[in-house]
Amino acid sequence: MAFFTHLTRRSLAQSAAMANAIKNVTVIGSGLMGAGIAQVAAQTGHSVTMVDIDPVAVGKAEKRIADSISRVAKKKFGEGDEATKFVSESLSRLRTSTDAVASVESADLVVEAIVENLKTKKELFSKLDNAAPAHTIFASNTSSIPIAKIAEATNRLDRFGGLHFFNPVPVMKLLEVVRIPETSSDTYDAMTAWGKAMGKVTVECKDTPGFIVNRLLVPFMFEAVRMVERGEASPKDVDTAMKLGAGHPMGPFELMDYVGLDTGKFIIDGWHKDYPDVEIFSPSPLLEKLVSEGKHGVKSGEGFYKYKK
Ligand SMILES: C[C@H](O)CC(=O)SCCNC(=O)CCNC(=O)[C@H](O)C(C)(C)COP(=O)(O)OP(=O)(O)OC[C@H]1O[C@@H](n2cnc3c(N)ncnc32)[C@H](O)[C@@H]1OP(=O)(O)O
Ligand SMILES: NC(=O)c1ccc[n+]([C@@H]2O[C@H](COP(=O)([O-])OP(=O)(O)OC[C@H]3O[C@@H](n4cnc5c(N)ncnc54)[C@H](O)[C@@H]3O)[C@@H](O)[C@H]2O)c1
């Protein structure tokens, strides 16, 4: 018993030290995920810089964050001074930028949440590798791209890993912490401790396609699309069935719209390229059509369903 208590104390102390080590966080990408990650990092006491190449995206993200932080504050503190203080202190820790390279100069951790494209992610990390201090940990929030392929762009494989958050980040409790063979124990421990400091429950993942959640969730969503393509059921009936028959908070079509159909297409296209013989990873004509029409789901106002802007 004393032995376990000793171990628990030691690992708690180590976790606290690791979590303390990460104070300055740069989040690259201010879309659905980047904004959520930046918000939660600011809420949990980190000094955060949120970066996007698109200034319009930064402006939209600031608005989304302000709305979301108010919801979080209301839930935590109700109405009143404490809620107001939580919002203003959290927002005071958040800066924005359109210059990724300048934004990593004092970062302890960089979390990348840009478009799901290997070439774009590698170009970004290659530039950041030259600009960031030696101790800085790099992590990707990719949904589906092997972390090892992204890390290749850098000379810091021991300080590289995956931090896969879930949408909406302020609400979803899980964080998948992904290690590649070269990820050092210190890096892995620091990423995990930071995840806990962000209020998340962490699970350890190997660098396998889709890690844990998406390896199960993406085939499920795509089988739902095939059912509709085969004329077996309507999106609405599939969604109703999975919510009422399987207890899911959203049906697969609602969820695809929520994640973003463009992101869904990037995921399936990447896996199809890597695993051409796996039938469930083959392109879906229905998804191709919607994406080509600019129907990217909730964020564009229309996907499988229509949304009020
Ligand atoms: C593809 C990627 O790689 C991986 C992924 O991310 S896959 C996607 C994973 N995400 C999911 O599966 C989400 C499934 N959906 C859900 O869990 C729920 O529908 C949902 C949490 C999004 C919304 O819940 P719902 O009950 O329908 O709506 P709503 O009442 O507005 O919200 C529930 C609570 O969450 C809070 N909330 C919802 N969105 C929020 C946000 N963006 N910010 C802050 N709080 C939020 C609300 O304030 C509310 O709080 P309350 O319980 O105190 O009232
Ligand atoms: N949407 C989800 O549910 C979800 C969940 C978990 C992980 N992810 C992953 O997170 C990442 C981002 O997804 P998202 O849904 O937030 O996408 P999004 O389309 O909402 O946002 C992506 C943002 O990246 C910006 N961007 C593109 N190239 C850039 C660059 N070179 N430098 C800086 N900014 C750049 C874009 O301007 C855009 O604002 C993807 O890798 C995705 O697979 C998405």
Image: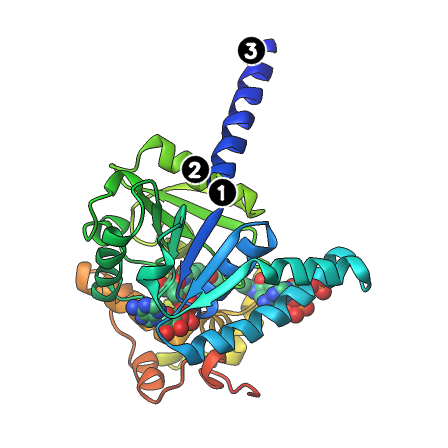
Q: Residues within 10 Å of mark 1 (few under 14, many from 20)?
A: many
Task: Note whether ligand 2 is within 8 Å of mark 1.
Answer: no
Query: Does 62 appear above or below 155?
Result: below
Mark sitting on residue 91: none
Quarter of image, ligand 2: bottom left
> In the image, is 186 to the left or to the right of 91?
left
How far from the left and from the top, in percent, is residue 93?
56, 57
How far from the left and from the top, in percent, is residue 18?
47, 34
Q: Is residue 17 visible?
A: yes
Q: Nearer the viewer, residue 154 or 303?
A: 154
Q: Earlier in the sequence, mark 1 or mark 3?
A: 3
CA separation in Å, label 1 and label 2: 6 Å
Query: Does 206 appear above or below 63?
Result: above
Quarter occupied by the C terminus: bottom right
Mark 1 vs mark 3: give the one in front.
1
Q: Is residue 279 visible?
A: no
Q: Which residue is mark 2?
A: 190
CA separation in Å, label 1 and label 3: 26 Å
Kindly state the secondary structure of the residue where label 2 is placed.
Answer: helix
> In which quadrant of the rendered view does residue 285 lie?
bottom left
Q: Residue at x 68, y 66 (%)?
A: 71
Task: Note whether ligand 2 is within 8 Å of mark 2.
Answer: no
Kindly state the secondary structure of the residue where label 3 is placed.
Answer: helix
Q: Which residue is mark 1?
A: 194
